[in-house]
Image: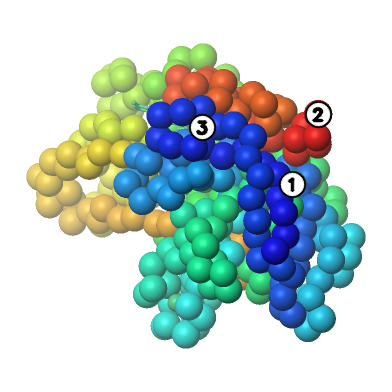
């Protein structure tokens, strides 16, 4: 077994603390990666605190991983020692169900068994453990190539925040002549604004934070609406083709349904702990769709990374040493992050 060091939540109530654990040895098709950076997703916090009710403790979060290949198994063909690589939310899947065969591993019929954390390692049967650690071992088919032109720390959040917005924007046809709304300017939302703008859509940001209006415009929004102000919301009645909700807490969706065009779609990517109340009439009266979307498949994640390379897109990050992770979680809960914390894994040795 490979001995790793990292940070783990010992239970739902305690802060994350240093922890030593093992991963499987490097198998024939595995890539061993020295982790350089790991983005901090709100899902990490939901998971560490068992808000989704499936956490196995001690829990090592982290699924926005960038690092360099340290070694490869004897049958690996895609990567070699020294390559700059990434790992997102998936380290495996069943590989045989219709979704896996179509490259939509995130919708695997077997569920999220292959989650980077919260899943089960197929070889050892142990819970999978994420990227708040010095190294990770991943099957080469679930490893991404990070374009060398991108700043590796700022590229890390693309592996979850980036793909989680890229996938629904592509699926629902964001582009020129389409009007797209993004709700919430956090890690996911700021990637949504950048990506929708780069795809050529008219992009509008909805925020609860007046202090983020100027940033929203700088990131590429054509308009920024303070969602608590009904008169600002009314400016956009019946006008959106697509709205993507990235909010991490329960909130009222009805005001947004009023902003959709007939036959338009509202997509939920935020995953709050508690169910969302839905008023159905605004949907009925527009033949509107309310949909969900989860991250993206491996091939689409690589496509997104290459799109970001072509458009010079990365996340806006605030770098932290891993010892500040608990403070970062508290700030994330206050919507006080511009716009993604990223852990410098060199701090593990400090
Ligand atoms: P984040 O950085 O904390 O951003 C969330 C943003 O939502 C905040 O910055 C804030 O933006 C807004 N917000 C927070 N509380 C709110 C409230 N009570 N009412 C209205 N707005 C509120 O979180 P994130 O990392 O982007 O993740 C967002 C959510 O997506 C989480 O639930 C996460 O688990 C989920 N997620 C889902 C997927 C998927 O595959 N579907 C993937 C990754 C993450 P403003 O200050 O602009 O209002
Ligand atoms: Zn995530
Ligand atoms: Zn499958």
Give the SS element for disc 1.
Answer: loop
Crowdedness near tag 1: few (<14), some (14–19) or many (≥20) residues, C-alpha within 10 Å: many
**Extreme right residue here?**
82
106 is higher (above) or lower (below) than 133: below
Horizontal side of residue 192 vs 289, given as left or right: right
**Residue 26 in the image, given as x and y percentages of width and height:** 74, 70
> According to the image, label 1 marks what residue?
134
Q: Quadrant of the N terminus?
A: bottom right
99 is higher (above) or lower (below) than 243: below
- Decide if ligand 1 comes within 8 Å of the CB at mark 3: yes
Crowdedness near tag 3: few (<14), some (14–19) or many (≥20) residues, C-alpha within 10 Å: many
Q: Quadrant of the C terminus?
A: top right
Give the SS element for disc 2.
Answer: loop
> According to the image, label 2 marks what residue?
350
Q: Indicate which disc residue 186 carries.
A: 3
Residue at mark 2 to residue at mark 3: CA–CA distance: 29 Å
Image quadrant of ligand 3 equals: bottom left
**Residue 120 in the image, given as x and y percentages of width and height:** 49, 64
Q: Is residue 160 visible?
A: yes
Residue at mark 1 to residue at mark 2: CA–CA distance: 12 Å
Residues at discs 2 and 3 in contact (Cβ within 8 Å): no
The earlier-in-sequence mark between 1 and 2 is 1
* x 20%, y 36%: residue: 254
Asked whether 101 or 178 is in front, the reply is: 101
318 is higher (above) or lower (below) than 194: above
* x 54%, y 58%: residue: 128
């Amino acid at each position: 077994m490979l001995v790793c060091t990292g940070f783990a939540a010992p239970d739902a109530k305690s802060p994350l603390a240093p922890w030593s654990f093992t991963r499987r040895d490097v198998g024939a098709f595995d890539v061993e990666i020295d982790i350089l950076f790991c983005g901090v997703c709100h899902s990490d916090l939901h998971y560490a605190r068992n808000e989704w009710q499936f956490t196995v403790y001690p829990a090592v979060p982290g699924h926005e991983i960038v690092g360099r290949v340290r070694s490869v198994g004897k049958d690996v063909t895609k990567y070699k020692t020294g390559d700059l690589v990434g790992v997102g939310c998936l380290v495996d899947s069943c590989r045989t169900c219709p979704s896996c065969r179509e490259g939509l591993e995130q919708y695997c019929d077997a569920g999220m068994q292959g989650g980077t954390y919260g899943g089960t390692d197929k070889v050892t049967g142990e819970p999978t453990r994420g990227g708040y650690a010095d190294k990770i071992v991943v099957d080469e088919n679930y490893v991404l190539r990070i374009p060398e032109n991108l700043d590796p720390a700022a590229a890390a959040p693309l592996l979850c925040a980036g793909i989680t917005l890229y996938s629904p924007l592509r699926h629902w046809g964001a582009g020129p002549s389409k009007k797209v709304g993004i709700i919430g300017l956090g890690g996911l939302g700021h990637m949504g604004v950048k990506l929708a703008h780069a795809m050529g859509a008219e992009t509008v940001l909805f925020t609860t934070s007046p202090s983020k209006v100027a940033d929203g415009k700088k990131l590429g929004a054509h308009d920024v609406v303070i969602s608590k102000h009904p008169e600002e919301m009314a400016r956009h009645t019946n006008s959106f083709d697509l709205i993507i909700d990235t909010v991490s807490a329960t909130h009222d969706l009805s005001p947004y349904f009023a902003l959709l065009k007939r036959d338009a779609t509202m997509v939920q990517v935020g995953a709050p702990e508690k169910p969302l109340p839905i008023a159905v009439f605004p949907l009925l009266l527009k033949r509107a769709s309310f949909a969900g979307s989860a991250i993206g498949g491996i091939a689409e994640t690589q496509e997104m990374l290459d799109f970001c390379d072509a458009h010079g897109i990365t996340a806006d990050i605030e770098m932290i040493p891993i010892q500040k992770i608990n403070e970062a979680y508290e700030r994330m809960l206050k919507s006080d992050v511009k716009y993604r914390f990223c852990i410098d894994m060199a701090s593990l040795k400090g």
